[in-house]
Structure formats: structure tokens, C-alpha cells
Image (spheres, rainbow, N blue to C red):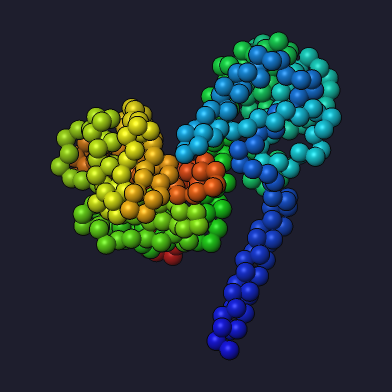
Amino acid sequence: MRAAKKRLLLILGLAALLLALLGAVRCAGITPALGSYDEIHLISEEPPPEEALVHLREALEIPIETVQVETLFHIIPVDAADLDPVRNRKNLLFLVDLSRREQITSLARDMLGAEKLNEVIRTGEPAIYFLENAWARQQTHAYLVAPTAAFFPIAAEEMGTRIRNGFLQSNRKRILEFLFFRGEKMTLARQIYERFGWRIRMPAGFQVRLDHMEEGFFSMRMDRPGRMLFVHWREGVEALPSPNEAIALRDSLGRVFYDEDYVEPSRTSAFPGTFQGREAVRIQGLWQNEKYTIGGPFRSILFFVPEEKRLFLIDYAVYAPSFPKKYYLWELEAVVETFTLEPPPEPEGSRS
């Protein structure tokens, strides 16, 4: 009887979640976008110039080493005549040739407005524009607008990074919305800030460990597949460590707090970077654990807060055998970007 009651409660809970999702969709007035986060459908009236396609692939299909090699995005060319079957896909990139008075040009004018297209004609310079949720929820449109098709190769070369970052930023928003749909641990985040002066958003589905907080170590994880994130901080630091020192610190933390995990040195590298406007050292590589015969990709960010003489190391790692790892790294990266030293907003209803 008790087991049957539990099953009934589970079914009711799932039904409530489904109704909430459907309600959100109805409120938005449009259906959710379909397909993978890493697919970009490239739509044009004519096959894009080969040189333009090469530059777009260089910008978007960047190899990512997880355990196997994956690519950041995957470009799928689509003829404008075949737009309807893909119009609800997550990522659409339109090549708009203003010398042609055809479907894509007319679409761009309707979606962007004549003023933006006229500006490209007036200046003779290509431009890139983004739209969110145009035909479907959690969908991104990018319009690469050029006076003629002859401009596409140089525009793809010069604007490839902006196009990549635009789609990545959109992915992060979508993933955060998905991760926090079932709630988050806001009270705990506030308590951590009040005690330690930093906070990070924690999805409700993640398990949090607080038993090493006095040692400057916080961690959370979600299983099936394994996604792990930790924050380490230490006081009285005078400078950002070197890349080699950063790798050594990450290795030592894994051995102590992650039950003898270690960094695989032959497939790990560190390099200068930034994090939220601060100078940083970034690490990417593989972790392993011989005790359990497991391993996977990880990423670390080390940054120094000189006014507090504090060093932070934020790390995220994946264990997903037989699965592509990229999406799960994106999930964790989206959470990492919520890290802040700023105080949390006042709870609703509190007095100023």
C-alpha cells in the first residue's frame, strides 16, 4: 500500500510538472524550439560561397577535446526553399544578400525592419543581427546581412567570433532556464554569501556538500550522468599563480577532496584568460581516478581578488561514459557564470 501511494504521488508530481511546462508554452504563445543545442542551420538562397563556408566552419566547428574530440557547433546548410521543415529549430543563421529580392531578403526585412537593411546598403558594410524567440521558444536567429554575396567570405571571417559568441550566449540562457525550472537553493546561496562572501546559483536537482567549507571547499553534483562542480578559495594570497602552479593546485584538490582524482598531465593545459572581467588562468584537461577506473573532461578557472587577497578556483567536470560530453560541460559552465561576489537581492516582501 505504501509503495502504491508513493507511485501515485510520483505520477501526480510528473503530471503537475508537465502541466506547468505546457502552461508556460501557452503563455509564450509559441511552441518550444526543436533539435540540438549544437546544430546551426545555415539558410541561404544559393549555396554559400565556399570561402564563406570555410570561415564559418573555422569559427563555429571548433574541435573540443573532452575524452573524444567533439566540435563546438555543427553547421547544416539549408536551401531557402526548404526552410519550413527547419523553421522551429533552435539555431538558424541566415545569409541575407541584399542584391537579391527573394525570400530571405523579404524575411530579413520583416524580422529586422527596413532601417537595418538600408543601413547596410548605405554604408556598404556587412552586419550581424540576432533575434530571440522569433518563431519558437528558446530559438535564436542570426542574420548575416551583406550588400551582395561577394561580401560573405570577408564578413564570415571578420564576424565569425561574434556569431559563435552570440549562439553560445543564447545557449547559456536556454540551459539556465532548463536547469532552474524546478527551482534553486536560494536560501543556501544567501547563507554562503553571509558567511564566506561569495555565492553561486544552485539548481534544485544538485546535491550540495558543505562539510569542507571551513577548509575553503564547496562542491555540488548531479548524477546520471555525473556533473561535478567545486569552488575553492584561500585567504592571504598575493598574486595569481602561474599556469603550472594552477594545474598543480587543481591536481592536489582533486586528490584530497575527490577521493584521489588526479589530473592527467599529458592531456591538460593551462593558459591566461579572463573571468567576469578579471585576469584569470584557465585550465582544460582530463581527470582520472584509478581507484574507481573512471575519468572525464574538466575545466578550471582561477582568479585573484586583490582587494580581498583571495584566490578562487572554480572547477567543473563530467563523467559520462558512452555519451558526448559537450552539452554537460555547457550546463556546468552556465552555472559557473552565475558565480558572484555581489550580495544577493533582498527577498521579496523585505523592508528596505
Specify whether residue 264 is in view.
yes
Depth check, front residue: 34 or 201? 34
Depth check, front residue: 202 or 116? 202
Horizontal side of 250 relative to 238 (left or right) equals right
Q: Position of residue 249 (x, y in %)?
A: 24, 40
Depth check, front residue: 119 or 270? 270
Q: Quadrant of residue 280?
A: top left
Q: Is residue 348 above or below residue 116?
A: below
Q: Is residue 222 above or below residue 281?
A: below
Work out which quarter of the rendered image holds the C terminus and state it: bottom left
Q: Quadrant of residue 5?
A: bottom right
Q: Is residue 312 above or below residue 161?
A: below
Give the total of numbered labels. 0
Horizontal side of 53 relative to 263 (left or right) equals right
Q: Which residue is painted at 71% across and 10% down in the image?
A: 150
Specify whether residue 184 is in view.
no
Q: Position of residue 263 (x, y in %)?
A: 32, 40
Q: Which residue is painted at 21% across and 57% down in the image?
A: 214
Q: Position of residue 259 (x, y in %)?
A: 29, 54
Q: Quadrant of residue 140?
A: top right
The extreme bottom residue here reads 1
Work out which quarter of the rendered image holds the N terminus and state it: bottom right
Q: Which residue is painted at 43% across and 44% down in the image?
A: 296
Q: Which residue is painted at 69% across and 53% down in the image?
A: 28
Q: Position of residue 125 (x, y in %)?
A: 64, 13
